[in-house]
Image (cartoon, coloured by chain):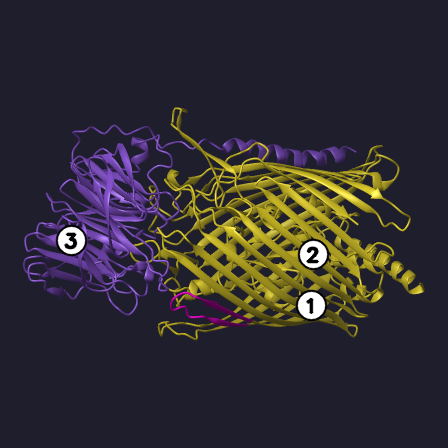
Chain colours: A yellow, B purple
């Protein structure tokens, strides 16, 4: 008891100091929050233990804060997959092939999908085969936070892998939280809607002891994936040239996901063990082209992994962290259409990953850290003459962080060593199968005025993207003498936030936040695919291309709190967020290729809009949540030849979501059973659009949700 | 309190600004108004651009030889009401009588138009590749032949479809080798170059010989791996057959098959694409993966002597993709697919290889025919 009291006192003090430190306005403002804050607040809420607070409390405000969606805000938005959620981030371009089962990948600041690393509960999701993570496969069901960092997470105490990408997206699943003396939580959810969607899920959390919690989660998704789409073309005089409506076929999906996690807390640290299993079968709807309205290709996925994290402090100045993961992925691709090339390919991919990192606090204002990772990937396939490559990757990083009143800075250096082994050799002797590179990153954040939450920050980061197994070894496609893609990022930004407490009767407070960033990126030796020979069913990879990206991002947040009664918990909160992204991604590969009839030099790179943005409004009042969101993607081109024939029309969608949580039983121990009813309507104006040409997107669609929380 | 309202204005302005941008979406409009093509216009070239698979960007450009001008993508202009335009991956184009036949591979059809590109109809042939004609019939090679599911060595044979050019109906089919490409008529026989491309690296290496009378395969001649195109020289009753090698250890080579003697001769050089004009077999070859070491020339079909052609702008050409020579002027036309994802280029040379003009085309310009 005494212990607990001390802990509470300590935590309050700490939270105050943290707030003062980080400039986070009171309440959980969604901007400017540090990653460590959330960890830290979690832990206070959970146990009120001093020891673990010690471990995490010293983490301070990010040098470059992420874009983050979490908690109520995340769940208020009408989202099915992680891909839907990241649309709201600035600098992100979503490539969506449409429908529930369609592939969804993202591109950060025009550098290419493979430059964005995705981390699931702290450990990178690997895909040595093609380097792309399909975000459509990650459910929002048990996610508590999605955070996007340009460059890297501004945290030096992390695995070396975390320093190794041009951008990083962190997906964090729910950690069990138990109110008062509750020992378990149960949540059952059923979602259903258009596209024949049926999506039940269940979450079970149990407090095994004060120090060990368990969480288990299972989800099943079924959808026919059928929807109507509409194509229409007009003549110059406005009359209809042609107009057709059809049903999207072969977009069905069936997926099962199960996860279980053990969360442990020790005197000086914490540990987390996680198991993940995902299995799916889906149709690949394919391109709608003249005379082809239906495709029949199918794909089966099976992904499983186990991962462990252990973090502890050793002595007063040292923190240690180890991570390990084993992943086993299977993919089967089938083209049963015998009028085309019959394909029944099976790919088996395995990964063993180990990492150790340490941080030392030299002085209260100065930390240093080091990490070493070893990553082993191997790929087997039933392709003829497939070389079954094995890749050893060793990553070593050293980093330092300074935090002094108005200054926060971080510098890191990463050594990447990659060695590929190709057991069944059919590779020419010129093969370069080792890569070695040292890449630096520097982040600085300055607070010019002591009492103003105004920050100026900047970073420089250089990083390589290794060619993937597909790039190198895909039979008859891979080109074994590829160089890694090199990216360099320069960023300068500023942000400001303030909390205004007002005296107006109704309005309790207003919080504002503004953020602006300008950046310049260079991508060298861009790996591109070109057809091989005179037929288009064989491709090969080449290092071809140099891209320069100049961009700007602006975002603004406003949060109003209105009194409805005297109790703060009855406040009505209105949260508004808007972001705008400007990107000029210029293909500077061939200076000679510069005529106006189809030249590519200084052309905007394929699928990158010059202008894009989003706006969301969320209303929270007692158990009621309502949100409106708008996403805008401006005109794009299908290639860097920016001619009228290559224009892709802008698209924008308006989505609405509302939910109502009703307590159904209440007793004094606060074991409340709640029912939540929700409704989402997406693309309310039924816009017919395409993100990728010939992959029509669904028009208006909706779903209903019932959730029971026990 | 004033500050509060002021702060409110900022995001509202942003929202308003974004909402203003929304007006930017236009209806998809067919490019320009239909072209007025006079039926008595001067001779033109049609360039069939393949377009990348899945892009639905098979297009036809019209090149006016006398005016030295190009009109791009004329198909939708001439046929604005055709849903999803010409289609996906144009693979061959030919004229027979007063009709033009456009093979659209992924769309699985042969588009039939008049000589001014006005649509007459279409013939369904899945995975169609190349076309040739004889005695009122069109012969189209296709990869989509019968499949033997019981065969553990799962393989897909190709076939040739026989099409009545009057009714535009497929009247018969004949199974051939694996993944047939080039087709050529020699006398009353049809020769089909089988590639086996789907089975890479175990390519087919045969030519199927089909009797036009019975429309049955009478013979399978072994030539070399991965056959691509086939051209008949009626003067010497020989076939020129190009093998593309295996893109690895086995180099590409051009073969000459004497149909009178049955003698097969490797000519010791490669022809990636070729065109026969006035007893000269024009060709280019080189490393088609990188676009390096490309050479151009012609082979005298009389003496079998090779003569190199030096193109005056050869450094500028990135990825030659087809060659055509004008019967009348002997002007040489070469298309450049560039990087395959951006518009290509049509180069026109005089017979000595001096550049006359160049024009942008659609994506992956791959096939040229002349129409008067």
Residue underneath mark 3:
B231
Q: Nearer the viewer, residue A135 or B237?
A: B237
Give the SS element for disc 3: strand
Q: Nearer the viewer, residue A312 or B53?
A: B53
Q: Is residue A628 visible?
A: no
Q: Nearer the viewer, residue B170 or A385?
A: B170
Marks 3 and 1: which is nearer the front?
A: 3
Which span of residues is magenta-colored?
A376-393
Using the numbered discs, state the Cα–Cα distance from disc 2 to disc 1 in whole angstroms. Answer: 19 Å
- In the rendered image, residue A18, in percent from the top left (x then y), is placed at 79, 56
Mark 2 nearby-residue class (10 Å; few <14, some 14–19, many ≥20):
many
Residue underneath mark 1:
A309
- Image side of residue A314 versus residue A647, left or right: right
Residue underneath mark 2:
A217
Give the SS element for disc 1: strand
Which chain contains the residue that carries disc 2? A
Question: Tags 3 and 1 in contact by the CB under 8 Å rule?
Answer: no
Using the numbered discs, state the Cα–Cα distance from disc 3 to disc 1 in whole angstroms. Answer: 67 Å
Mark 3 nearby-residue class (10 Å; few <14, some 14–19, many ≥20):
many
- Image side of residue A502 versus residue B116, left or right: right
- In the rendered image, residue A524, in percent from the top left (x then y), is placed at 45, 59
Q: Is residue B18 visible?
A: yes
Mark 1 nearby-residue class (10 Å; few <14, some 14–19, many ≥20):
many
């Amino acid at each position: 008891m005494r212990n607990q009291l001390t802990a509470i006192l300590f935590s309050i003090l700490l939270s105050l100091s943290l707030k003062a430190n980080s400039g986070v306005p009171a309440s959980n403002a969604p901007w400017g929050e540090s990653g460590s804050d959330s960890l830290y607040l979690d832990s206070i809420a959970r146990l009120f233990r001093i020891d673990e607070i010690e471990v995490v409390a010293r983490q301070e405000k990010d040098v470059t804060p992420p874009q983050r969606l979490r908690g109520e805000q995340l769940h208020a938005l009408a989202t099915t997959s992680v891909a839907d959620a990241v649309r709201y981030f600035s600098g992100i371009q979503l490539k969506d092939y449409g429908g529930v089962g369609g592939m969804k990948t993202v591109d950060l600041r025009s550098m290419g999908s493979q430059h964005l690393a995705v981390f699931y509960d702290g450990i990178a999701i690997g895909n040595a085969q093609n380097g792309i993570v399909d975000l459509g496969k990650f459910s929002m069901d048990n996610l508590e936070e999605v955070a996007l960092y340009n460059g890297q997470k501004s945290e030096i105490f992390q695995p070396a892998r975390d320093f190794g990408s041009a951008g990083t997206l962190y997906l964090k699943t729910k950690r069990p939280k138990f109110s008062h003396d509750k020992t378990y939580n149960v949540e059952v959810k059923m979602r259903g809607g258009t596209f024949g969607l049926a999506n039940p899920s269940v979450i079970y959390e149990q407090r095994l002891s004060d120090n060990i919690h368990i969480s288990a989660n299972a989800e099943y998704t079924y959808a026919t994936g059928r929807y109507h789409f509409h194509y229409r073309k007009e003549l110059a005089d406005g009359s209809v040239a042609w107009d057709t409506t059809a049903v999207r076929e072969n977009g069905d999906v069936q997926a099962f996901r199960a996860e279980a996690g053990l969360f442990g807390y020790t005197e000086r640290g914490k540990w987390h063990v996680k198991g993940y299993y995902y299995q799916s079968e889906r149709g690949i709807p394919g391109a709608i082209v003249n005379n082809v309205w239906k495709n029949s290709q199918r794909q089966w996925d099976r992904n499983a992994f186990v991962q462990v994290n252990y973090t502890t402090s050793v002595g007063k100045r040292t923190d240690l962290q180890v991570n390990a993961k084993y992943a086993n992925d299977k993919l089967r691709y089938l083209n049963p259409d015998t009028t085309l090339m019959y394909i029944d390919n099976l790919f088996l991919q395995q990964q063993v990953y180990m990492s150790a990192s340490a941080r030392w606090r030299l002085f209260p204002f100065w930390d240093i850290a080091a990490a070493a990772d070893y990553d082993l990937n191997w790929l087997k396939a039933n392709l003829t003459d497939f070389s079954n490559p094995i890749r050893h990757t060793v990553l070593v990083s050293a980093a330092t962080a300074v935090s002094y009143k108005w200054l926060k800075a971080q510098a890191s250096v990463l050594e990447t060593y990659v060695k590929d082994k190709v057991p069944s050799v059919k590779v020419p002797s010129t093969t370069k199968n080792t890569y070695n590179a040292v890449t630096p990153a520097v982040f600085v954040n300055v607070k010019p005025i002591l009492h103003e939450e105004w920050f100026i920050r900047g970073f420089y980061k250089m990083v390589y993207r290794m060619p993937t197994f597909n790039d190198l070894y895909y039979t008859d496609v891979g080109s074994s003498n590829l160089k890694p893609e090199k990216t360099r990022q320069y960023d300068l930004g500023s942000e400001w936030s303030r909390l205004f407490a007002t005296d107006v009767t109704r309005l309790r407070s207003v919080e504002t936040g503004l953020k602006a960033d300008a950046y310049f990126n260079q991508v060298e030796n861009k790996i591109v695919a070109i057809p091989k020979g005179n037929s288009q069913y064989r491709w090969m990879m080449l290092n071809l291309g140099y891209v320069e990206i100049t961009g700007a991002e602006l975002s603004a947040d406003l949060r109003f709190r209105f009194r409805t009664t005297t109790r703060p918990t009855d406040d009505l909160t209105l949260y508004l967020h808007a972001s705008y992204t400007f990107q000029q991604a210029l293909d500077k590969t061939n200076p000679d290729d510069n005529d106006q009839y189809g030249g590519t030099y200084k052309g905007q790179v394929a699928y990158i809009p010059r202008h894009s943005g989003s706006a969301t409004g969320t209303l929270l009042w007692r158990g009621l949540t309502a949100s409106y969101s708008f996403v805008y993607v401006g005109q794009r081109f299908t290639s860097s030849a920016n001619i009228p024939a290559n224009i892709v029309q802008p698209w924008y969608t308006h989505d609405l979501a509302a939910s109502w949580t009703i307590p159904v039983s209440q007793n004094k121990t606060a074991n409340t059973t709640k029912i939540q009813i929700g409704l989402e309507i997406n693309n309310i104006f039924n816009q017919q659009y395409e993100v990728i040409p010939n992959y029509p997107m669904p028009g208006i669609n909706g779903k209903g949700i019932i959730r029971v929380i026990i | 309190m004033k500050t509060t309202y002021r702060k409110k204005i900022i995001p509202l302005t942003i929202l308003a600004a974004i909402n203003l941008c929304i007006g930017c979406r236009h209806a998809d409009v067919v490019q320009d108004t239909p072209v007025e093509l006079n039926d008595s216009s001067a001779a033109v070239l049609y360039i069939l651009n393949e377009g990348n698979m899945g892009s639905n960007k098979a297009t036809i450009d019209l090149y006016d030889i006398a005016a030295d001008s190009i009109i791009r993508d004329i198909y939708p202009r001439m046929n604005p009401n055709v849903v999803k335009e010409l289609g996906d991956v144009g693979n061959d184009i030919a004229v027979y009588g007063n009709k033009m036949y456009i093979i659209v591979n992924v769309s699985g059809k042969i588009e039939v138009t008049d000589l001014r590109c006005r649509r007459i109809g279409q013939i369904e042939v899945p995975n169609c590749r190349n076309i040739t004609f004889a005695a009122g019939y069109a012969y189209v090679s296709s990869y989509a032949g019968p499949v033997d599911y019981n065969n553990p060595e799962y393989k897909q044979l190709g076939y040739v479809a026989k099409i009545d050019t009057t009714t535009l109906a497929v009247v018969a089919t004949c199974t051939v080798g694996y993944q047939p490409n080039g087709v050529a008529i020699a006398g009353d026989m049809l020769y089909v170059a089988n590639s086996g491309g789907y089975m890479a690296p175990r390519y087919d290496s045969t030519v199927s010989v089909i009797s036009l009378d019975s429309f049955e395969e009478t013979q399978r001649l072994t030539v070399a791996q991965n056959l691509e195109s086939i051209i008949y020289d009626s003067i010497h009753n020989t076939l020129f057959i190009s093998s593309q090698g295996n893109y690895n250890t086995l180099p590409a080579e051009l073969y000459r098959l004497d149909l009178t003697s049955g003698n097969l001769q490797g000519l010791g050089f490669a022809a990636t694409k070729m065109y026969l004009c006035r007893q000269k077999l024009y060709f280019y070859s080189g490393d088609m993966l990188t676009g390096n070491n490309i050479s151009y020339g012609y082979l005298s079909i009389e003496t079998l002597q090779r003569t190199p052609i030096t193109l005056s702008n050869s450094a500028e050409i990135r990825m030659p993709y087809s060659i055509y020579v004008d019967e009348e002027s002997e002007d040489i036309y070469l298309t450049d697919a560039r990087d395959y994802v951006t518009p290509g280029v049509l180069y026109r040379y005089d017979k000595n290889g001096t550049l006359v003009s160049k024009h942008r085309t659609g994506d992956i310009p791959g096939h040229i025919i002349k129409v008067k």
